[in-house]
Image (cartoon, rainbow, N blue to C red):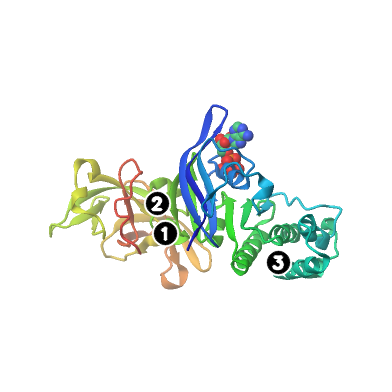
């Protein structure tokens, strides 16, 4: 694979305020890459740099190894889709899609062929003669997408393209966007603050906080092995508990959670057992607890129980008063009642162990 977009020690300042301190990142050719993070973390700022709308105060932005810092937006061959569709209200669907081709002086026959092809790809050919005001939000967003990709851009940029759509349509459209991107094979940079959307569409995700990349990885990497506690809690739901690293009976490293529950966690290194790491935090996702019957585990009391068909969501109060979320597949578990005493075991290979500050994952080397 070759690198399509590279950020090398990129710095962004607005006046005296630094919003991106120094950021390096490579996006591969053909990749669906998502910038994900809370509001204000700098996602749009980075995307606008790629588009050429933002100045760069330090470092280099490259496309295929060519430095782009001072190349104007019109010379970057980029397609863009934003939250507000920005399609022309006075032009029909076909005319909207053809617009960029006319601008580029593409001949009529070629233009008609490409417009027809793209309308087919985004599945709106039956609306080709309609005016935008007679289209639903999802259909308008398909027009915007068609218009962005019909010009054969080197890079497609999308900034929260689904935020104006209602929940079900968002899911339909994100599937459509993913399918179309795969078909067209275009390098795509996508911005969202919605972690589920990011997981659904991306080949890789960069999780950002305050202008700093916290982790880059596939959705699976990021969900299963979060680099720090910020990522663990931002992506999906998790339970964070205090624990201790100790030497077990056989001399191996064990993790003790609560008063009497110890488990051997693969990947914890002997040298971690020092004053600095003896007190740790563990992150356990709701589905990584197992109702253990009378086996070893954390004793607790069920304080809430919500049956949702496929899954049952429980809240269990542990001995120390902490309430944890537990998700069990309904079909594979006995029904449990509110007030019932249960024992929660933890799947040792899926637990993530962090130092006290939450900055460092102590068993990250272990892949699932
Ligand atoms: N033109 C500007 N002038 C000054 N500060 C700005 C400007 N644009 C953005 N900022 C600041 O830069 C930081 C990053 O903003 P940015 O819009 O990139 O965040 P974001 O992650 O895209 O957030 P959101 O999800 O809310 O759009 C924020 O603190 C924001 O207030």
Q: Residue at x 33, y 46 (%)?
A: 360
Q: Residue furthest top?
A: 16
3D distance between C-alphas at marks 1 and 3: 30 Å
Q: Residue at x 13, y 57 (%)?
A: 251
Residue 271 left/right relative to 103: left
Q: Which mark is residue 122?
A: 3
Tell me the crowding category of disc 1: few under 14, some 14 to 19, or many 20 or more residues within 10 angstroms, Cα based: some
Q: Earlier in the sequence, mark 3 or mark 2?
A: 3
Asked if marks 3 and 2 touch (Cβ < 8 Å), the reply is no
Label count reads: 3
Residue 108 drawn above or below residue 100: below
Pinpoint residue 281: horizontal percent, then vertical percent. 32, 47
Answer with mark 1 or mark 2, whichever residue precedes in sequence: 1
At a point 53% along the width and 55% down the height, the residue shown is 64
Asked if labels 3 and 1 touch by Cβ distance under 8 angstroms, the answer is no
Res. 114 visible in picture? yes
Q: Are there few (<14), some (14-19), or many (20+) residues within 10 Å of tag 3? A: some
Q: Ligand 1, what quadrant? A: top right
Q: Is residue 39 visible?
A: no
In the rendered structure, the answer to whether residue 255 lies left or right of residue 6 reads: left
Residue 134 in the image: x percent, y percent? Answer: 84, 59
The label number, if any, that marks residue 221 in the structure image = 1
Which element is circle 3 on? loop
Pick whichever, 335 or 171, lies toward us: 171
Q: Which mark identifies residue 169?
A: none
Q: Nearer the viewer, residue 35 or 195?
A: 35
Depth check, front residue: 145 or 318? 145
Q: Compared with residue 319, is residue 143 higher up or lower down, i.e. above or below?
A: below
Residue under circle 2? Answer: 239
Q: Quick one: SS at disc 1?
A: helix
Task: Kindly report which numbered mark, 1 or 3, lies closer to the viewer in this rendering.
Answer: 3
């Amino acid at each position: 694979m070759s690198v399509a977009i590279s950020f090398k020690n990129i710095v962004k300042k607005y006046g005296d305020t630094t919003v991106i301190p120094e950021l390096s990142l490579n996006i591969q050719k053909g990749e669906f890459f998502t910038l994900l993070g809370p509001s204000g973390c700098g996602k749009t700022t980075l995307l606008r740099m790629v588009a050429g709308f933002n100045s760069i105060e330090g470092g280099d932005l490259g496309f295929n190894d060519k430095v782009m810092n001072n190349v104007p937006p019109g010379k970057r061959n980029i397609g863009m889709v934003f939250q507000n569709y920005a399609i022309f209200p006075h032009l029909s669907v076909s005319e909207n899609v053809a617009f960029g081709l006319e601008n580029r002086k593409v001949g009529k026959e070629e233009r008609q062929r490409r417009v027809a092809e793209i309308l087919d790809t985004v599945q709106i050919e039956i609306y080709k003669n309609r005016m935008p005001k007679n289209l639903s939000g999802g259909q308008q967003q398909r027009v915007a997408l068609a218009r962005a990709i019909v010009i054969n851009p080197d890079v497609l940029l999308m900034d929260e393209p689904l935020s104006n759509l209602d929940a079900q349509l968002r899911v339909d459209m994100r599937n459509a966007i993913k399918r179309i991107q795969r078909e067209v094979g275009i390098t795509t940079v996508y911005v969202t603050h919605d972690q589920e959307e990011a997981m659904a569409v991306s080949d890789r995700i960069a999780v950002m906080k305050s202008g700093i990349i916290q982790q880059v990885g596939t959705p699976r990497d990021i969900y299963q092995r979060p680099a720090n506690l910020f990522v663990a809690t931002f992506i999906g739901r998790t339970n964070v508990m205090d624990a201790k690293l100790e030497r077990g009976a056989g001399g191996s490293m064990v993790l003790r959670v609560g008063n009497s529950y110890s488990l051997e966690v693969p990947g914890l290194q002997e040298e971690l057992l020092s004053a600095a790491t003896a007190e740790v935090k563990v992150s356990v996702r709701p589905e990584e607890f197992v109702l253990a019957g009378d086996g070893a585990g954390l004793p607790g009391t069920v304080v809430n129980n919500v049956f949702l068909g496929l899954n049952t969501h429980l809240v269990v109060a542990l001995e120390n008063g902490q309430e944890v979320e537990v998700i069990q597949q309904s079909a594979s578990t006995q029904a449990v009642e509110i007030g019932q005493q249960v024992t929660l075991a933890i799947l040792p290979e899926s637990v993530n162990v962090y130092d006290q500050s939450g900055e460092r994952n102590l068993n990250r080397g272990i892949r699932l």
